[in-house]
Image: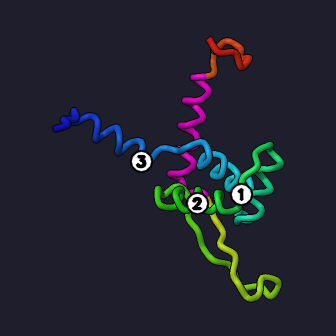
Amino acid sequence: MLCFPLDYFRIVELMRDSLGSCELMVLLAVCRLDQNAYGVPIVRELEQRGRRMAVATVYAALDRLEAKGFVTSWFGEPTPERGGKAKRYFRATGKGVREARATQRVLTSLWTGLPNLKGETT
């Protein structure tokens, strides 16, 4: 029988609310696009910044971000060019912005003073 220290469950709970790298990139793209954040522009923003990501991957990340309370979504008006289908827009929440800033601080701290990485393995 496995026994876990009580802290294990706290760590798992904290990890559930943390950002993965894909989620972080999508969240930052949403922030950059402001009121125009929906699937295709998010994919384009990521590509312009050097990261290719499929639309399905972006929407999966957006669903996870929304479940965590980091973004909120709403549907725009249906448009004829989309066959009467409405676009689903996204906006970062205060909680999402705080988590992105916290992640930035941790990553900056980890990079500071790190020797140059040259792809070498030891």
Compare marks 3 and 1 and give the one earlier in the sequence: 3
Label 1, on which residue? 54
Residue 52 percent across, percent down from the top left = 76, 49
In the displayed structure, does residue 89 sit left or right of residue 94? right
Q: Which mark is residue 97?
A: none
Q: Residue at x 57, y 48 (%)?
A: 97
Query: Which circle, 3 or 1, is nearer the viewer?
Result: 1
Mark 3–mark 1 distance (CA, rounded to whole Å): 23 Å
Element type where label 1 sits in the image: loop
| Quarter of the C terminus within the rendering | top right
Residue 70 percent across, percent down from the top left = 53, 55
Q: Which residues are magenta?
A: 92-110
Up/down of 57 relative to 9, above or below: below
Q: How many marks?
A: 3
Mark 2–mark 3 distance (CA, rounded to whole Å): 15 Å
User: Between 35 and 50, which is closer to the camera in this rendering?
Assistant: 50
Q: Amino acid at mark 3?
A: Arg
| Residue at the far left in the pictured view | 1
User: Between 117 and 37, which is closer to the camera in this rendering?
Assistant: 117
Up/down of 12 relative to 71, above or below: above
Q: Which mark is residue 16?
A: 3
Compare marks 2 and 3 and give the one earlier in the sequence: 3
Compare marks 2 and 1 and give the one earlier in the sequence: 1
Q: Amino acid at mark 1?
A: Ala
Query: Which circle, 2 or 3, is nearer the viewer?
Result: 2
Q: Residue at x 16, y 38 (%)?
A: 1
In the displayed structure, does residue 14 sit left or right of residue 115? left
User: Between 43 and 79, which is closer to the camera in this rendering?
Assistant: 43
Q: Amino acid at mark 2?
A: Ala
Label 2, on which residue? 60
